[in-house]
Image: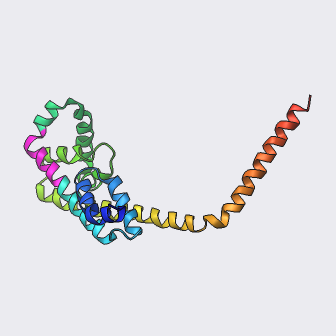
Amino acid sequence: MSLATLLAEYGYLAVFAGSLLEGETILVLAGFASHQGYLSLPWVICIAFFGGTLGDQIFFFIGRRWGEHLLVRVPGLRASAQRVRRLLLRHHRGLIVGVRFMYGLRIIGPVVIGMSEVPARRFLLFNMVGAAVWAILIAGAGYVFGEALQRLLAHAERYEAMVALSIVVIAGLVGAVQWLRSHKD
């Protein structure tokens, strides 16, 4: 099975599954695959939006139902939970939108928000805004990376001789300096 076939058959499913959790790597790769023509960028963004929204909604409701029990059973989450609670008190709208961009808080963030008094509808609204921004930025970054790589490689042949000549000149200069130092005595 070729890479193109694999991407065509499972690429969108991988984007959805990855977006349910912490899917930045998969989403960047999907954006890159979109640039290469294997996937459609609008579809990648839409699927990532739905997967990201659904994943955070699930974690929100896990927090609503089992959040306190989860923090008792997994004490290692307490420090992150305290950080989310402090941010939630001051900036709950911004936190809901931005939690998916905060390293280490992508999953525990919605759980802790679910444990709070934030209404489910408010969380859904700001979660959707955050998922939309996230899907566009991360998939777009992968697409832009593909464009930059294509442009770099397209001109690589033009600069190949110049780079090779530069390496020879630098190596010659280093060799000359070492020779001069050794014969200076």
The colour scheme used to paint the residues is rainbow
Tell whether 57 sits left or right of 84.
left
Residue depicted at 31% across the width and 65% down the height: 5
Residue depicted at 35% across the width and 65% down the height: 4
Tell me, yes or no, if residue 183 can be seen here: yes
Residue depicted at 26% across the width and 57% down the height: 14
Q: Nearer the viewer, residue 49 or 41?
A: 41
Q: What stretch is highlighted in magenta?
A: 56-67
Tell me, yes or no, if residue 127 can be seen here: no
Q: Residue 154: x percent and y percent?
A: 57, 68
> Magenta segment: does it hold 20?
no
Tell whether 66 sits left or right of 22.
left
Magenta part mainly helix, strand or loop? helix
> Height in image: 100 above or below 174?
below
Residue depicted at 28% across the width and 70% down the height: 43
> Height in image: 179 above or below 55?
above
Give the quarter of the image for residue 81.
top left
Q: Residue 19: x percent and y percent?
A: 25, 56
> Magenta segment: does it hold 66?
yes
Q: Residue 174: x percent and y percent?
A: 78, 42
